Image (cartoon, rainbow, N blue to C red):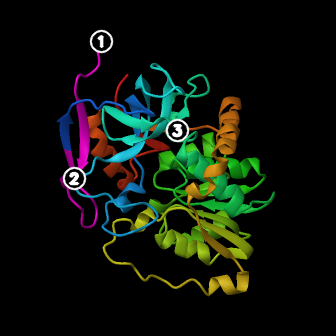
Amino acid sequence: MAGVRNSNREWIFAERPEGEPDMDSFELRERDIPDPKFGQLLVRVRYLSVDPYMRGRMRDTESYAEPWEVGDVMHGAVVGEVVESKSDAYDAGDLVTGNGTWADYSLLDADSVMPVDPNVADLPAYLGVLGMPGRTAYFGLLEVGDPNPGDTVVVSGAAGAVGSVVGQIAKMSGCRVVGFAGSEAKVEWLTEELGFDTAINYKEVDDYEAALDDAAPGGIDVYFDNVGGPITDAVFTKLKLDARVAVCGQIAHYNDEEVATGPRKLTQLIATRAKVQGLLVADYATRFEEASEQLGEWVATGDIAHRETVVSGLENAPDAFLGLFSGDNIGKQVVKISD
């Protein structure tokens, strides 16, 4: 294998963070390239995904995802090339995506990966719009949000991997779409390229309720929440009768050491009879093929645009992850590991 490594670098979870993580939580080690067992694939990682949910796995508490133990190899979705196959389903040279590790080479179970077609989209897209974030947007909006033509849909974290897809599907569903994002560049991307009707730069706005009065004067039918915090507090005061709220993420609180009380907004749900539902894409696992096919068609026809922020080098994976909490990325944040 000319031009490839003869050892395997792996990022280890070195220390549980208190508050916002820093580099002390990570340690890069070098080991032998692992050998696949029956039913496994040895995959040379091309691109690695870093995602906000990983912060939850750093806590020593049970949640929907099992916490990492100190000393574990960091895990995440990858796209890569099969180097060695111990499965009849895939051959060396095939491109696949699945749940791997922060490493140059990763062992993946053949029955848990999906093939990748670079003719449909570039490889990083399979970690974003054609991966878990895209499927989250698809099921979260269409099943939990249940949009109807003419509805007003508000999306927080709208310039992220999930929110950017949510807004575009909402537009295809005939909705008016309002996004919250953290820079003028992101606002411009949402409105000029993705078709959002309007967007709010939350870093430049002091009064979110007043901003929503201007952006959604008739109230809000669907709220897709990726952020939580003061934005969500403001949205709850603008919900219409029978509104639907999909709670996908709460990145504003992921580094909190104590649960914030904040304004109490549940009384808003009584008069509006609004429904608030948590969202885990894994609940729709039996329908992933449906979502992947539809998202692939939308990407191929140009109905959905996508963007990836690419950080090069496995050694920079922690920086790419930490950048999620300061909003460095537009679209999906990925790490390029190899050519």
As drawn, 152 above or below 115:
below
Answer left or right for 86 relative to 285. left
Where is the C terminus found, in terms of image quarters? top left
Mark closer to the chain start, 1 or 2: 1
Q: Position of residue 62 (x, y in %)?
A: 39, 69
Q: Secondary structure at mark 3?
A: helix
What whole-number distance in Å separates the C-alpha atoms at marks 2 and 3? 27 Å
Tell me the magenta residue range. 1-27
Asked whether residue 20 is drawn in magenta, I would say: yes
The quarter of the displayed image where residue 6 is located: top left
Q: Position of residue 26 (x, y in %)?
A: 22, 49
Tag 1 and tag 2, C-beta contact below 8 Å: no
**Label 2 element class:** loop
Give the camera-side residue of 61 and 185. 61
Q: CA distance from mark 3 to mark 1?
A: 29 Å
Q: Is residue 6 visible?
A: yes
Who comes first in sequence, dot 2 or dot 3?
A: 2
Instruction: Judge whether 142 appears above or below 1 on screen.
Output: below
**Residue of label 3:** 111
Dot 1: element: loop
Badge 1 is on which residue?
2
Quickly name the residue at label 2.
Answer: 71
x, y percentage for residue 243?
A: 71, 72
Tell me: residue 229, above or below residue 66. below
What is the three-letter code of the residue carrying label 3? Answer: Asp
State yes or no: discs 2 and 3 in contact (Cβ < 8 Å). Answer: no
Going by the numbered disc 1, the residue's amino acid type is Ala
Circle 3: is it few (<14), some (14-19), or many (20+) Cα within 10 Å? Answer: few
